[in-house]
Image (cartoon, rainbow, N blue to C red):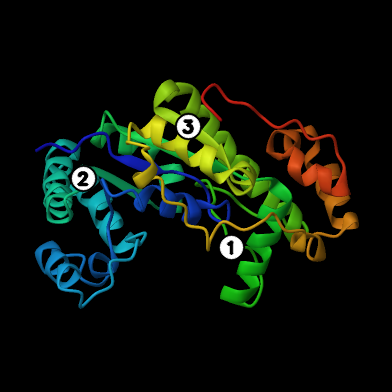
Amino acid sequence: MSLDRPIFIVSPARTGTSLLYRCIGDHPLVGYLASADMTFPAYPRLARFLTRVGICKDSKREARRVWIPFHNISCVKLGVPAAARKFSRRIEAMLQSKGATRFVAKLPEFCRKIPWLDECFPDALFLQTARDWRPTVSSMLVKGEMMFGGGIFGTRRRGFVPRAGEPEEVTAARQLLEVNALLKAERDRLGSRFLVLWYEDLCTDPAAKIEGLFRFCDLPARAGFLRLPTEEIRPLSDQWRAILTPEKTAAVRTALGDDLLALEHPAINAGGEGGGGAHFSPGHAF
C-alpha cells in the first residue's frame, strides 16, 4: 500500500478550517491523526491501539506534536525522501487500521510549508478555505482576547512584523492579506491540485459544496457517503459587526486599499456593510 494523494488543508486560522476538516474527515474512506496521536506522538502503534479500543476518542486533531518533529527531521536529520517514507508508513498503518484509503490533515502552519509538503508528497492535493476578511479579522481579535487577554490570534508569514501604533484590526487584516498572497502564489504554481472553497458558500449551500469537494478529492459522493456535520454548519452571522464597527472597517479600508476586495464575499456585503467586494475566483474554485 502506498499513500495515495494525501489531502492537506492549508488555510490560515479562523477561516473555517475545522469545518472543512470535519467535512472531509467524516468520509468513511478518509483517515486522520486523532487525539491519541497528539498525546503519544512518538508511539504511533500505541496511539492506534488506544483509539481502536476506545480509550482515546477518535476525534480529528491538528496533531502539531506529530507534524513539527516530522518537519524538523526531514529538514535536518534524515532528509526529505527518507523522512517522507517513514512518515508515509506510519500513516498507511493508521489507514489500514481504520479501513480507510485516503488521508487528510489540517494545520494553520501548512500555509507556510506548502513547498515542503509538495516535496514530501508530490501527488498531494491542497485545500484552502477562503473567508471574508471582516468576520475573519473579528474572529482573530476575539480569539486573541480569549487566548492571550488581547492581541491577535492568527497565521503569519515568516518575518511579519506589526507596525508601531497600527490599530489591531489593521494589523490583523494586513497579516491575513500577506498570508493569502503566499497562498495565491502556491495556487498558481500547483494548478489543478489546489482548490479554494469559500466558507460563506459552504455555510449557505453545504450539500452541493461538499459534493464538489469530494469530486475534487476523488472520493465517492454516493448518498451514504455524503455526511453533513450539521451541528457545525450554521447560518452566516453578523456578530462580527460588534467587534469591527463601521469606523474600524473604514480605517482598515483606508490603510490597505483595494487589496481587500479579493477577500470580500457578496454574502457579507449583502448584509448592508457595502464596499462592492469582488468575490475572487481563482483558477480552481467553486
Q: From the viewer's perspective, is 249 left or right of 209? A: right
Q: Residue at x 52, y 58 (%)?
A: 230
- Please give the label number shown on residue 227: none
Disc 2 marks which residue?
Answer: 74
**Kind of residue at disc 3:** Leu
Above or below, 196 relative to 49: above
Mark 1 lies on a secondary structure that is loop
Kindly report the distance in space between the C-alpha atoms of the residues bearing marks 3 and 2: 26 Å
Picture quadrant of residue 36: bottom left
Disc 1 marks which residue?
Answer: 153
**Kind of residue at disc 2:** Ser
Q: From the viewer's perspective, is 276 left or right of 18? A: right
Kindly report the distance in space between the C-alpha atoms of the residues bearing marks 1 and 2: 28 Å
Q: Which of the marked residues, 1 or 3, is nearer the chain's N terminus?
A: 1
Q: Residue at x 48, y 28 (%)?
A: 187
Q: Which of the marked residues, 1 or 2, is nearer the chain's N terminus?
A: 2
Mark whose residue sits in front, 1 or 2:
1
Q: Residue at x 26, y 29 (%)?
A: 122
Mark 3 lies on a secondary structure that is strand
Q: Which of the marked residues, 3 or 2, is nearer the chain's N terminus?
A: 2
Q: Position of residue 213 (x, y in %)?
A: 45, 36
- Binning the other alpha carbons within 10 Å of mark 1 as few (below 14), some (14 to 19) or many (20 upward) gives many
Q: Residue at x 9, y 64 (%)?
A: 45
Q: Residue furthest front?
A: 223
- Binning the other alpha carbons within 10 Å of mark 2 as few (below 14), some (14 to 19) or many (20 upward) gives many
Q: From the viewer's perspective, is 17 left or right of 252? A: left
- Please give the label number shown on residue 195: 3
Mark 2 lies on a secondary structure that is helix
Q: Position of residue 11 (x, y in %)?
A: 50, 45
